[in-house]
Image: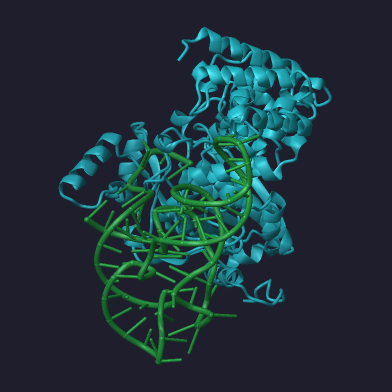
Chain colours: A cyan, B green
RNA sequence: GCCCCCAUAGUCUAGUGGACCAGGACGUCACCCUUUCAAGGUGAAGAUCGCGGGUUCGAAUCCCGCUGGGGGUACCA
């Protein structure tokens, strides 16, 4: 057998070695079929198949990302056509959630991933929604029965339940006992005539072993006796994942399946299914799981898990992508900040780690902060902050309204505050005193610096106000010089003067540098707020 | 229980037989800057490379066993 890619480039990487292994194996097992695959060496077709059962999980987002990076990054670099297929796996009617599909597509777009074929854009293998493809699966299951690779199982859920309990009691490995695999044709006919409902199960080979070639883990060997006769078609006529997945991946000419590690146990069954159909097995790569901080599955208990939640908290898609890319993949062990373009330029499946990774919220926050403070352009950042301010009622513009005065004002505020924004959702609170005329109520006691008292503070503020009335805070340098002069004249440290002014003007003990803060707040408000603070000190109990 | 995957600091990782008494990052701590808080800068602590056997002149790197963690064990995906 001559491999079609044998004339290809030199420099065998671990990746190509693995590809070669797999190809050889495939050729040995599916020689006839391999001949039909002319040209497939030149294209890499991957897919991301979410279930519309709720919001998109970060783990799913990472799987989607890696698939996208292979299709749009690695494949083109290797001179191949890459394509990403989005397929909706909605074969479990009981878990279907209305609107979930739309939500998933929307969040994937926000994340920055695009696909070539899918329910929204169509494509040559439409429909891309499994519930609309049931005939295909039923036909496939029927074919399998005909050739003896699958069988009808009339066992009731009650019997299966009882069987499981019995096995549990006897401490035997649970699993279907294959009772219906040996039903005679007469028995089957009787059941069918009686209208008994049934599922279709795969007749898994009982002997030998199945080797699964995984691009990330190498060879995985499974003893066939340990594998089950999985249900292929359910009583309701819908397929299980196992059948739908194999049928669709073949039909859609998927060449590489990248999915979560949780699929490893059933991978050998899938391989056997492909063989039963006489189809070539796509390449397989099982991504490492994303674990929760304490170990185990990432769940609500640890924090957000859905991409929608991260979005609404004000995580940037860039930061999410950067962080997620580095969960299980690395460029060189040094690079932390890497753009989408650079990911496309450098991502390779061969550098995906096989070991599970713990989701670290603190590091994600760091990435977000870093992108806000160091990567995003000011206009861009401002546009992303605006929706959060609007939601909070602080401004009344839309993000696209970048020409108006109010946007310019928000940009000004953003400029001096961006080094302390970690999540966009924190912006409203940080910006409140810049954007509102009136300060939120605050404790007058916070006006008084440590080691000072009310009377002194009041006098200090009065002197400060007098000074500020004779200049404009628009000139930061002048304001600073004058106030430092004042502090010196009063025989106090600059901080003893700055702090009361800061609190008087912002209502807080924390703010950006005093003079940029004053400048942005403006003369009128600065003066009136200091005057109010002086009144507040009067009103309080003298101490 | 059975099957399978994984194993470098609290976390993400670099490392593919010798330049590693293990490099980067998050986190932590200290100091610097300083009008507060951040940001930034500098530095520190933190890994017997899970343990035990091999192979080899030489192992984080290869092999075996064990342990630990994780996944699967559904007419869910």
Residue at image position (67%, 16%) is A436
In the rendered image, which quarter contains the C terminus of chain A?
top left
- As drawn, the residue found furthest toward the top would be A539
Report whether A160 appears left or right of A325: left
Residue at image position (59%, 46%) is A64
Report whether A436 appears left or right of A246: right
Numbered disc total: 0
- As drawn, the residue found furthest toward the right would be A403
Q: Residue A54: image x %, image y %?
A: 50, 31
Q: From what the image shows, is residue A520 above or below residue A542?
A: below
Q: From what the image shows, is residue A46 above or below residue A17?
A: above
Q: Residue A143: image x %, image y %?
A: 50, 49
Q: Is residue A427 visible?
A: no
Q: Residue A380: image x %, image y %?
A: 74, 36
Q: From what the image shows, is residue A421 above or below residue A73?
A: above
In the rendered image, which quarter contains the N terminus of chain A?
bottom right
Residue at image position (71%, 37%) is A121
Q: From what the image shows, is residue A173 above or below residue A539?
A: below
Place residue A378 in its image quadrant.
Answer: top right
The residue lying toward the viewer, choosing from A489 and A542, is A489
Place residue B54 in its image quadrant.
Answer: bottom left
Residue at image position (65%, 15%) is A529
Q: Is residue A512 visible?
A: yes
């Amino acid at each position: 057998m001559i491999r079609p890619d044998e004339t290809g480039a030199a420099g065998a990487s671990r990746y190509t070695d693995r590809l070669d292994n797999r190809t050889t194996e495939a050729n040995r097992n599916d020689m006839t079929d391999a001949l039909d695959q002319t040209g497939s060496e030149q294209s890499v077709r991957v897919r991301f198949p979410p279930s519309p059962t709720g919001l998109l999980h970060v783990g799913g987002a990472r799987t989607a990302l890696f698939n996208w990076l292979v299709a749009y990054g690695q494949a083109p670099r290797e001179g191949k056509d890459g394509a990403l297929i989005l397929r909706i796996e909605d074969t479990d009617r009981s878990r279907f959630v209305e609107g979930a599909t739309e939500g998933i597509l929307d969040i994937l777009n926000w994340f920055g991933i695009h696909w070539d074929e899918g329910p929204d854009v169509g494509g040559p293998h439409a429909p891309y929604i499994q519930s609309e493809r049931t005939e295909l699966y039923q036909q496939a299951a029927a074919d399998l029965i005909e050739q003896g690779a699958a069988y009808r199982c009339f066992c009731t859920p009650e019997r299966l339940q009882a069987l499981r309990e019995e096995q549990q009691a006897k401490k035997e490995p649970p699993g279907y006992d294959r009772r219906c695999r040996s039903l005679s044709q007469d028995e089957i006919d009787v059941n069918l005539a009686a209208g008994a409902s049934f599922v279709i199960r795969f007749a898994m080979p009982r002997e030998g072993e199945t080797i699964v070639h995984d691009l990330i883990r190498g060879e995985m060997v499974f003893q066939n006796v340990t594998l089950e006769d999985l249900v292929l078609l359910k009583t309701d006529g819908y397929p299980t994942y196992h059948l739908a997945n194999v049928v669709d991946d073949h039909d859609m000419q998927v060449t590489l399946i990248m999915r979560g590690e949780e699929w490893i146990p059933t991978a050998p069954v899938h391989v056997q299914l492909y063989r039963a159909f006489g189809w070539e097995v796509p390449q397989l790569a099982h991504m490492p799981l994303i674990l929760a901080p304490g170990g185990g599955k990432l769940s609500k208990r640890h924090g957000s898990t859905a991409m929608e939640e991260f979005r609404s908290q004000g995580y940037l898609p860039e930061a999410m992508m950067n962080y997620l890319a580095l969960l299980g993949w690395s460029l060189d062990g040094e690079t932390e900040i890497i753009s989408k373009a650079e990911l496309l330029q450098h991502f390779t499946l061969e550098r995906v780690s096989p070991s599970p990774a713990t989701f670290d919220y603190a590091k994600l926050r760091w990435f977000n902060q870093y992108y806000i403070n160091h990567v995003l352009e000011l206009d861009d950042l401002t546009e992303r902050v605006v929706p959060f301010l609007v939601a909070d009622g602080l401004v009344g513009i839309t993000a696209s309204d970048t020409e108006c005065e109010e946007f310019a004002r928000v940009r000004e505020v953003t400029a001096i505050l961006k080094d302390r924004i970690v999540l966009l959702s924190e912006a409203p609170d940080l910006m409140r005193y810049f954007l509102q005329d009136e300060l939120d109520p605050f404790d007058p006691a916070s006006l008084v610096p440590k080691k000072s008292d009310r009377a002194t503070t009041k006098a200090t503020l009065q002197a400060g106000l007098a000074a500020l009335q004779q200049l404009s805070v628009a000139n930061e340098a002048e304001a600073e010089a004058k106030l430092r002069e004042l502090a010196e004249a009063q025989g106090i440290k600059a901080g003893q003067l700055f702090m009361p002014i800061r609190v008087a003007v912002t209502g807080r003990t924390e703010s950006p540098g005093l003079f940029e803060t004053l400048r942005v707040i403006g003369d009128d408000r600065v003066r009136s707020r200091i005057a109010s603070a002086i009144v507040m000190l009067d009103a309080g109990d003298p101490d």
